[in-house]
Amino acid sequence: MARPTTLVRPAPARQVLPVVAASTAGASVVALAALGAAGHGGYASDPVGAVALAAAATVSIVVAARLGRSGHRTAGRLAAGLAGSLLAYLLLTVLAVAAVAAGQPWAAVTVAAWNSAWIPPLALMQLTASAAVRTSGATPWTHRVVGLTLGAVTLVNAVLTTASEPFAGLPTIAGESWRTALAPVGATATLLGMGALLVLPVTLWRAALGSHETVRARLGIVAAATTAAPLTVAFCLLLAVARAPGGVEPSLGSVAFLVALSGAAAFAAGCALAAARGAAEPRQVTVVVRVAGLTAAALIITGIGTIVAAPGSSLGPTTVALLVSALTVLVGGAAWAGTGLLARTLTPPPPSGPVGPETTPRVEATIAPTHVGASHRPPADTPSGAEGPVGTADAVAGPTAAGASGAAGASGAAEGSGGVGVVPEVGPAAVGGLTAREREVLAALAEGASNAGIAAQLVVSERTVDAHLRAIFMKLALTADGTTNRRVQAARIWLEHTRQRS
């Protein structure tokens, strides 16, 4: 007798939250539109910026619900926090504009809080994307650094900065519109915040470029997503530069910043969802990398073009147009070519040879040479105390086989030229002697993750990963004999183990 099918219904909170978020965002937009029509708020009540924030909040809460349903609870909670921070920004805008318009004595406090409300979304968009590839419930140190530092920066900015004429035409990007108490403290906090926003992009790009196959693609997507936050800050700084030499109209610049912040938040949330789904399609990787790369190129072009075209510049209109055009072609072309190359690097290669419905998929182990000029000889293992394949990402670069959980690596004999010997016949039964954590490490290794990639996913240090790998090699009887790569052998054993269990 067939067992009845059980329907899994989403939790009521996950069904209600998107509706509540969309309703709150819509009400805020309507309230700001009404205040703007009455002549209050200036750029703060501009409908374009308000609608952008509302749309980003709605996208983030929908992503949060989908991440929660897929089992990525931490990423889902952070995405919900991102949506909440964007909604809080909208609500604070309504409250601040209304308080200033009514002449309330507490208006200055509200405006100070509003002036700092754009910082938390930067941290939350990074944390959401980063959490999408974590397989452990532990909080990595990088998340603590970003969260604590950006939280402190938000508090310092709110306490030390006040507006001289809030909503009177001079936005936050115009330095003359704000007074800062204890300027050195505020400048230090700003620099610390900018440094904290670079921690996750650097860590994740390093993990992505050192890994292989589907792991590289997923890590590359979230690395590009975390890059959106520092690019948003760079855009803010560019607006400040454009305000002084370029004469950019302040209100327009502020609205442009709100749109940029909203776009970055929606981009990061979408990338988190794509990475959480597992295997990334080449087209997805290309789109994500190109969006990040071309955005950076646009900032460079706009920044230099603004300075060149400044009213005080001695260059004529024709010269300025030629310089900006040449810069656009040069920087834009380089960005297009570079992002295309990076996307191809991050994308797993297609399987070698046809895999028909009546054929058994076979995964071959190949060792990618990593040292130019070494006669294409794969790196051999080094003694346990040295920095070799255990501590680097030289490992599995073979084709992906269907039905192996997206893993790429070794199955069967690892044959090659240049002195690579035959992989010893070590049975997959040896996997039974591994601990639960060692199995997780070995599974990530078989997917193509480098030590940095394994550490990023399991939320452990690279030193811990290295120790686990040495223990795994010892339990699997994989010795460093100078002719074979233990990482490839270990991956082959794991994939054979999973194939027998399936």
Image (tube, helix red, strand yellow):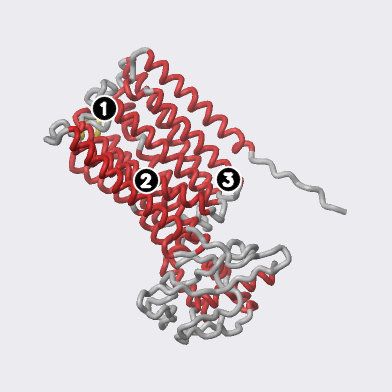
Q: Is residue 198 left or right of residue 72?
A: left
Tell me if residue 134 comes above or below residue 255 in the rendering: below
Q: Is residue 353 left or right of residue 394?
A: right
Q: Position of residue 121 (x, y in %)?
A: 40, 40
The CA distance from mark 3 to mark 2 is 31 Å
Tell me if residue 166 comes above or below residue 16 in the rendering: above
Q: Is residue 452 left or right of residue 500?
A: left
Instruction: Check contact, mark 3 vs mark 1: CB within 8 A.
Output: no
Q: Quadrant of residue 153?
A: top left
**How many numbered badges does the structure rendering display?**
3
* Residue nearest the viewer, comparing 43 with 342: 342
Q: Earlier in the sequence, mark 3 or mark 2?
A: 3
Task: Name the mark nearer the viewer: 3 or 2.
Answer: 2
Residue that badge 3 annotates: 68
Q: Secondary structure at mark 3?
A: helix
The CA distance from mark 1 to mark 2 is 25 Å
* Residue nearest the viewer, comparing 471 with 49: 49
- Note whether residue 147 is visible: no
Residue that badge 2 annotates: 294
Residue that badge 1 annotates: 250
Badge 1 amino acid: Pro
Q: Position of residue 285 (x, y in %)?
A: 48, 52
Q: Position of residue 28 (x, y in %)?
A: 45, 24
The CA distance from mark 3 to mark 1 is 40 Å
